[in-house]
Image (cartoon, rainbow, N blue to C red):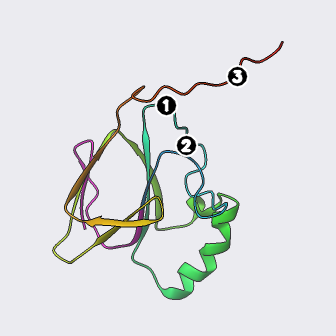
Amino acid sequence: MRLKADGLDLSGRYHLGVLANTSSMGGGMLIAPGARDDDGVLDLVLVRDMSRFSLLRNFPALYKGAHLDSPGITLTGLRRLEAGSDETVYLNIDGEADGMLPAVFGILPRAVRVLAPRRKD
């Protein structure tokens, strides 16, 4: 895959790439521990090309957010990601098959206003 994160070249062979705006996905997997939806940053988790055994060994760590300590798994904070590939790569966006590469992703800080009840102190 060809990846440019805020101009930084992260191109390589990957099993998985997740661009997250919150810390969890898929029923409790802490894919990007520490990610916040209000910080103006997207978290890119990349899983490099590795053996199936290594993938299976690291999978349980996803539920604790401990997978980022494993070799070949990285987290990068970014505001813009340009992604492309010479192969067909389909996108899964929030659990729905939606499009394919090439694609550009970006963040619009404070684009959505969220109303919450006032806290009683």
Q: Could you say where residue 104 lies in the image, as x and y percent from the top left?
A: 23, 50
In this rendering, the answer to whether 113 lies above or below 10 is above
Label 2 SS: loop
Q: Nearer the viewer, mark 1 or mark 3?
A: 3
Quadrant occupied by the N terminus: bottom left
Report how far apart the C-alphas of labels 2 and 1 lie in the structure. Answer: 8 Å
Q: Do the residues labelled 2 and 1 touch (CB within 8 Å)?
A: yes
Q: How crowded is mark 3: few (under 14 residues within 10 Å), some or many (20 or more)?
A: few
Residue occupied by mark 2: 35
Could you say whether the residue bearing mark 3 is in a helix, strand or loop? loop
Residue at the disc numbered 1: 39
Residue at the image position 67 percent from the left and 60 percent from the top: 28
Identified at 44% across, 30% down, the residue is 112
Crowd rating for badge 1 (residues with CA inside 10 Å; few <14, some 14–19, many 20+): few
* The C terminus, quarter of image: top right
Residue 60 appears left or right of 47 = right
Q: What residue type is labelled 1?
A: Asp
Q: Which of marks 3 and 2 is nearer the N terminus?
A: 2
Q: What residue type is labelled 2?
A: Ala
How far, Cα to Cα, is label 3 from label 2?
23 Å
Find the distance from the CA under tag 1 to the CA under tag 3. 20 Å
Task: Decide: is 102 above or below 22.
Answer: below
Name the disc covering residue 117, or none.
Answer: 3
Mark 3 or 2: in front is 3
User: In the rendered view, does 45 fall on the left or right side of 66?
Assistant: left
Q: What element carries label 1?
A: loop
Left or right? Give the position of 67 relative to 47. right
Looking at the rendering, the stretch of residues picked out in magenta corresponds to 1-17
In this image, 66 relative to 39: left or right? right
- The percent position of residue 61, horizontal first and vertical second, equals 66, 67
